[in-house]
Image (cartoon, rainbow, N blue to C red):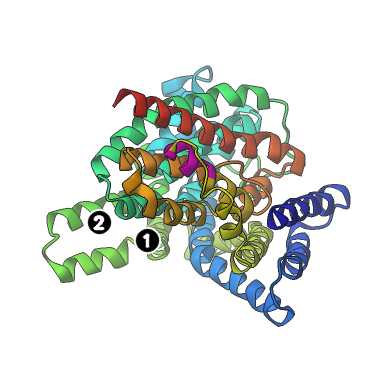
Amino acid sequence: MGTLIVMLCLVVLLIVLTGTFKINPFIALIIASLIGGFALGIPPSSVLTSIRKGIGEMMGSILLILTFGAMIGKLVADSGAAKVISDRIVQYCGLKYLQWGLMLTGLIIGIPLFYNVGFVLVIPIIFSLVYQYKLPPVFIAIPMLASLSVAHSLLPPHPSPTSLIVLFKGSMTKTFLYGILIAIPALIIAGPVFSKSLMNIRSLGELPLMKPGQIPNRLPGFFNSIFSALLPVFLLGLTSIVKLMFSSNVRLTGGMNFISDPSFLMFLALLIVTYTLGTRQGRPLRDIMLVYESGVKDIAMILLIIAASGAFKQVLVDSNAGDSIASLFRSSNLHPLVLGWILAAIIRICLGSATVAGLTAAGIIAPMMSNFAVDPNLMVLAIGSGSVMFSHVNDTGFWMFKEYFNISLKDTFKSWSLMETIVSVMGLIGVMILDKIL
């Protein structure tokens, strides 16, 4: 119980530092990491080691993805490709049903892509709609980002649900089909329905990656625009098909595994997009490099904040905070699926990482599965749903959303955190309904 109290105090501290005293989130997260390390019993000589390790691991996992993604996003916006795509979405859906079109687009993008990759790819499309049609950014963004969140937590081949399927000896096909059934109502409630309450949330200033009026005279065609913006999706789909068709060819499969790694995939996409939206459109290579440089400058502070959130998370991991919280529920008489969801949700709230929350909860539940009369595929989905519960100050996604959309901490809680909570709760409801039906 003492660990839980310390966790709550750290969250309050972050809110006070960033919200009341207006301290930069990067500095606030470092302060909270130091205090948290000491308060949770990490030896003083090891606190800075945990912080450095957390920053290193976080940057090692997402620096290339976010940097290449920002470069691609900046060129997609600067070349006019984002405008071309957003115009076509409006043409097909109309402004009245725009959010539904964005929700479907987000799900299509989210199924094959890692969350961070999908996030940076959809940003220029969202910003283009915001500037062109004078729409509230958060109101437009939530349906699309809710789709990415659902795909990340419920649908293989994302790392967390795929790992859980292996751990619980489930079926990839069944989990995907059950996940889609659960995802549809979750997306509708967390996306178009919930976002109606967010129309009054406004950005505190300009949005990164794209400024009003930056529309070139020569726009790329629609096919070129959609191909370039979603190239990582197409590349990942192609490598997945090749791996399935030639699974017995170890050398070819190994090569496809290398190409489909998110960091290399984004780099390969960047090289191709440099041609399709750059030199092919008549832009000098020197100008394209300046666009990329500008794109990285736009997200420099975002990268620092994400790095610091990695330090905060690592302090919690090294202090075994997740294990301490989870042990409180081991002897519970709750329904197994509810227990799995609660464990993942609490660890997620404590540690911030959805993947860590899911795998930690699964490690606790897996040894007990022989005593539970539940479908292992539903357990995967229950834990996956719990793993996205109430994203807040210790989650990378929270800070990405806040900084990209340049909104206050309060509004981030009202929009992003509540959206993730709705996805999580709707996921549990869907799992329990399927448990009764199947």
Q: Considering the numbered disc 2 on the image, is that residue within a helix, a strand or a loop?
A: helix
Left or right of 353? Residue 42 is right
* Quadrant (top left, top right, bottom left, bottom right) of the C terminus: top left
Does residue 223 appear in the picture of this structure? yes
Q: Main secondary structure of the magenta part?
A: helix
Left or right of 380? Residue 28 is right
Residue lying at 59% horizontally and 39% vertically, measured from the top left: 127
Residue 114, percent from left and from top: 42, 52
Examine the structure image and report whether residue 341 is included in the region drawn in magenta: yes
Mark 1 in CB contact with mark 2 (< 8 angstroms): yes
- The 10 Å Cα crowd at callout 2, few under 14, some 14 to 19, many 20 or more, is some
Residue 359, percent from left and from top: 45, 55
Cα separation, mark 1 vs mark 2, equals 10 Å
Q: Considering the numbered disc 1 on the image, is that residue within a helix, a strand or a loop?
A: helix
The residue wearing badge 1 is 265
Examine the structure image and report whether residue 109 is included in the region drawn in magenta: no
- Of labels 1 and 2, earlier in sequence is 2
Name the amino acid type tagged 2: Thr
The residue wearing badge 2 is 239
> Between residues 338 and 404, which one lies in front from this camera angle?
338
Q: Which residues are magenta?
A: 336-342
